Amino acid sequence: MQIQTTYKQVKTFFTKLWHKFIWWWRKGWWAKTVTVLVGLVLISLLSLYGVSRWYVTSNADKPLQLGVTFVPDYARSLGVDANQTMDALINDVGVKRFRLVSYWNKHEYQRGTYDFSDLDWQFKKAEKAHAKVSLAIGLRQPRWPECHMPDWAQNQPASVWQPALEKYISTVVDRYKDSSSLESWQLENEYFNDFGKCPDHNRSRLDKEFAVAKKHDSKHPIILSRSNNSFSLVLGEPQPDIVGMSVYRKVWDAKITKQYYTYPFPDWYYAGLAGLQKIFTGKDSMIHEMQMEAWPPDGKFIADISTKEQNKSMNADMFAGRIQFAKNTGMRTIDLWGAEWWYWRLVKAHDPSIWNEAKKTFEHTSSPSS
């Protein structure tokens, strides 16, 4: 009797729903247009969700490789010792994977004169710790102003600085390609993102730089990264070996609302993008920049705002949730953003909360495969 009653209720519900749909459909062409558009959106979202579930499941048995981006100049700008920061990340937190940078303006300050001493000691520390390194190369690399062009190349036409940049890339690749720690290259961080002070985003330049890196080292994979939360895939040439993805959660809106907001995209959105990338190109994806650092309001420098203000966009309580969010994307190589700031909070702000959360995270994460 109960089953019959339930069946009648369900039948009545769907009958009414169908009648309302017919009523709406007959209201005119605009109603039909809205209905079709809503239907297409729903089908697209359901398809993306289905792809995300497939991608997460297909990667479930792969080991998780967790690392950090480390920029010594940023550590110094925070007033902490760069050597001590990297030592602490290795020995205290347990980091075994680093995303390092090779700023052009730092290592070729004068044209034709190279000084890699600052990058050499980072590689030596990584090699001693048996840690893996993904090295950023090219003009556009992590941290403001995004593109790191030396003064002697500024205001020069591309016909002058582009060949010099390609020579610099080949010099970097030749210097570090035989390091026991080197795992990959990341070429031109978020190349097509117009954020930052950069001269151009011409695809032909990217293609040439990719060819240069491959010519000098065909052994190690090259990562090319897409922009932050936009719905896009890396489909054109050059085709990378691995696709990088940045994931930011809570930021300051400086243009409209003048307040903090959280991006509305769920973890399965990023899993769906990685899954579509795999389907269309056969290339796997990784998170090369997972936001684990506060986002200061109004363009302020992070060390110039209070820890109370910092905690609004990143704090110890958010840390575990962000890590779980990243894991839920199904991507198994994840580089965290903000490690230098964790150390600043520890030694300068005398707040170990975030540092301790990082230690807990890495204690429960498998090390990169050797």
Image (spheres, grey):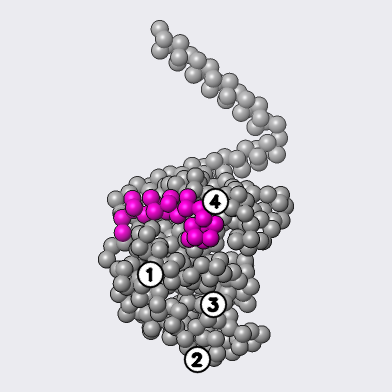
Q: Tag 4 or tag 3, which sits nearer the N-term?
A: 3
Residue 139's label in the rendered image is 3
Q: Which residues are magenta?
A: 343-367
Residue located at (31% from left, 68% from top): 129
Return the residue at label 4. 314
How far apart in space, not on screen, are marks 1 and 4 (Cα)? 26 Å
- Give the side of residue 234 with respect to residue 19, left or right: left
How far apart in space, not on screen, are marks 1 and 2 (Cα)? 25 Å
As displayed, is residue 73 above or below residue 215? above
Amino acid at dot 2: Thr
Q: Nearer the viewer, mark 2 or mark 3?
A: 2
Amino acid at dot 4: Met
Q: Tag 1 or tag 3, which sits nearer the N-term?
A: 1
How far apart in space, not on screen, are marks 2 and 3 (Cα)? 17 Å
Residue located at (41% from left, 58% from top): 334
Percent coordinates x, y for residue 357 in the rendering = 43, 50
Return the residue at label 2. 113
Return the residue at label 1. 133
How far apart in space, not on screen, are marks 3 and 1 (Cα)? 19 Å
Q: Nearer the viewer, mark 1 or mark 4?
A: 4
